[in-house]
Structure formats: C-alpha cells, structure tokens
Image (cartoon, rainbow, N blue to C red):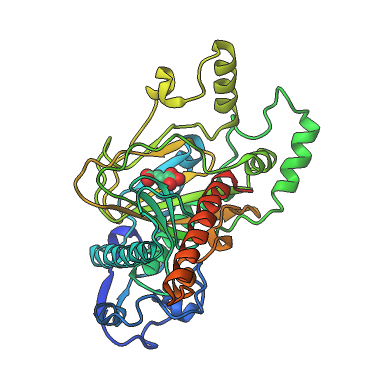
Amino acid sequence: MRRRRVDAQADFTLTARHSSRHTDREMRCTLCRGQSGVATSRKPLHADSPKLATESQMITIATAAAALSPPLNLRHATELRDRGYTVIPDAGISADLVKDARFAVASEFSRLLDNLEELGIDPVESSYAFKELDKRHANRWSVRPTQAESAWTRLVDSAVAAASPVVEALHAELPPSADDGLLPEFTSPMARSVLGGASRLLPSAPKVDQIGAIVSRPGAGPQRFHADAGDTHLQLARLSPRHRLFNVFCPLVDLEEGGDGTMLWPASHLERKRLEYDVFCADTCRSYLLERDERAMAEMAVPACPAGGLLIFDFRLQHRGMPNTSGRERAIAHAVLATGGAFDKLGADASPSLIDAVDALSDDPATRRKQREVVAQQQADSWELQRANSAA
Ligand SMILES: O=C(O)CCC(=O)C(=O)O
C-alpha cells in the first residue's frame, strides 16, 4: 500500500474504457478486485441506461492509500478512543470523485424509488426494508449499491483506505481507555489481565462489514437517538477492546457545524459514561429520551465535515441524523469497519430484494395486485424485524 501524506494527494480522473489500466500502485477498482462489500451477480440495475453506460466508462483513479501521516493517525485514533468520534476534513478524496459518487448515489436511489412505486409502496409514508433500500423514517433512507463497481464504491474504497490506519493505530498504538470495558471497581485484576491477554489475540486489522449511503431529503425530521450497536455487541465489546465496529461516513455534500449532519454524544460509547447515565436516569426517574435531557443535550456535537471528508465513529456512540432544512438532498456514503471478529447483524443482505420483487410482478392485473399486497405486508414486517436486529 502506498503511503502518502494527504496533502500530497494526486487523484485524477480518466475517461477510458474499463480495462487493466490501473496498476498495483493505484487503486484497483472493486470490479477487478471482486470485493465491493456487496456481491451482485444479477444484471446491474442501470445496465440499459445510456447515461450510466457512459459514466461506467469513466474511471476515477484515486490513490488507494490516502493515508494521513502517522502522528495525524494517532491524533484521530486518540479522539476516536476518548470521544468516540473523529473528523478528518481532508481524507485525500478528490472533488471529482465526490461529484461522480454523488451522481451515482442519486441515480441508483432514484431508480430504486421508481421500483418502489411499481410495487405500489409509498417511498415516504410506507415502512419497508429491502436489501437495496430501507426507510429510516420519513425522508431518510439507507441505500446499498446495486452495481458491483461505481464511483460510489470507489469513493468508499478511498474512505476505507484513509480510515483503516486510524483504526489500526487505535488498536496497535494506544492503551484502551481506562473508562471503557471492564471497570476496575467491578472486575478483579486477574480477570482483567486474562481477558486483556485473550483480547490481544483477536485480529486488529479492520475489515469492511458493509457499505452504503444514507440519504436525507428536505423535510426529514430529527432521528431518535440511538447507538448502532445492540446488546450483544455491547457485551462483547466490554470484554475485548479489539471487538469493535466503526461507522465511516463520507458526506457527498458539505455539512456545516450544527447543520443537517449527524449529532453525536461525545464519550457515550464508554462504559463509565453509559453507567453514569443509567444511574442518573434511574436516580431521577427521568425519561430515557436523550432529547429531553438538558444535561446530555448540552454535551451534543454536530460536527462540520466538508464533502469528501470523513466522520469516523464507534458503533456504541449515541447519535442521530439531524433534520434536513437545507433545500438540497444530503447523501452520506459510508462503510462499516469491523475488528476483533465483530459484525453487524443488521446486514441488509438477508432482506428481500426490491429488484427481484419488481422482476417477479405478473402481467396479469389481478395477480399483480395480489402480489403487491403481499409484498407491502412482508415489507412492513421486514422493517420491524430490521429495527429489532442488532450488531454483534
Ligand atoms: O442521517 C444521519 O446522519 C445518521 C443516520 C443514522 O444514524 C441511521 O440511519 O441509523
């Protein structure tokens, strides 16, 4: 992997047929590498689109190792450990790649919304959780790539290349936070030492668990606060500082501080902070709704992040998407990085495919109507199920 300082980044875009142009020193595209995080053996959704056929001939070559300098990686790793998140404003991802990725996400998203309408599912009002698209809440969606390779997947590859050394530095170069994991007042030194030794045997190199994008449209309200980690992940993460999941968000539009980005509760991934909060809630019998808790709300941050920058945060961190009052579509491409054997059970791969459901529609109007009713009911159930699932 070529290590370069981010300010020396030299991304460039070539218009060329997709061929063996890229060398080992450049980023090999996901098509050739055969790993995009989303396997698609089916016909690409846009295979028949002239616009996208042209776009698929555009190869944006980004240097794979948009790595920051080692001291910068360490600084970001320290923030990630202590605050649960860090922002890398310049991850070395070119403006051209960001623009192409924004176009790719918007095209795939809009085609998926058309598919929903063919099924008679209201994109904003109905509840659904397909493999390719699920509704978070009104006007906020999670989208997965339907093509094995696109500017979107290439951008995520670059984001992963920049974020991975930060995660590796967190595991390899920093001691775990004293406020995280098994707290000394509840665990014997012997147990801590045995578990610490066992934890160091787990793999520290990050793996891509999944990739996608979160799109919010004007009119999206605030999300409920949540941690992406479920109980199983919280318990295993307590036993091992290596067992971790991290969101890597790469906004495709500029996000201003306090704007329509993501609100994060700093340090809420830490055992001690969560414990204090539980105790505080139990003591005062107050609602667990963070948004009603002035003390917690005073600590919240909605960091700025320019398009192509990165927000990396721990899966255990309390966060929520902010309302979109901007007048423009807000897309964030993302990857989930996993270490120490962690994985996200939410994985949309188990959900039914939207594209397959449309392909299966009968030409006979009565059968078609019945099929649509069945899919709509299945989707309402699938949406509930997805909400109940959690990361391990
Ligand atoms: O939209 C955002 O900023 C965050 C989205 C999110 O956390 C989610 O959909 O679970």
| Front-lying residue, 380 or 17 | 380
The answer to whether residue 208 shows anywhere in this view is no
Residue 159, relative to residue 185: is it above or below? Answer: below
For the view shown, which residue lies furthest in the left direction? 327
The answer to whether residue 314 shows anywhere in this view is yes
Q: Residue at x 57, y 52 (%)?
A: 346
Q: Quadrant of ligand 1?
A: top left
Residue 175 pos. (x, y %): 59, 40
Residue 75 pos. (x, y %): 43, 43
Total residue callouts: 0
Residue 177 pos. (x, y %): 57, 34
Residue 237 pos. (x, y %): 64, 42
Residue 155, relative to residue 57: is it above or below? Answer: above
| Front-lying residue, 247 or 126 | 126
Q: Residue at x 61, y 53 (%)?
A: 345
For the view shown, which residue lies furthest in the front direction? 366
Residue 190, relative to residue 126: is it above or below? Answer: above
Residue 358, relative to residue 23: is it above or below? Answer: above
For the view shown, which residue lies furthest in the top direction? 284
In the displayed structure image, the side of residue 13 where residue 225 appears, left or right: right
For the view shown, which residue lies furthest in the right direction? 190
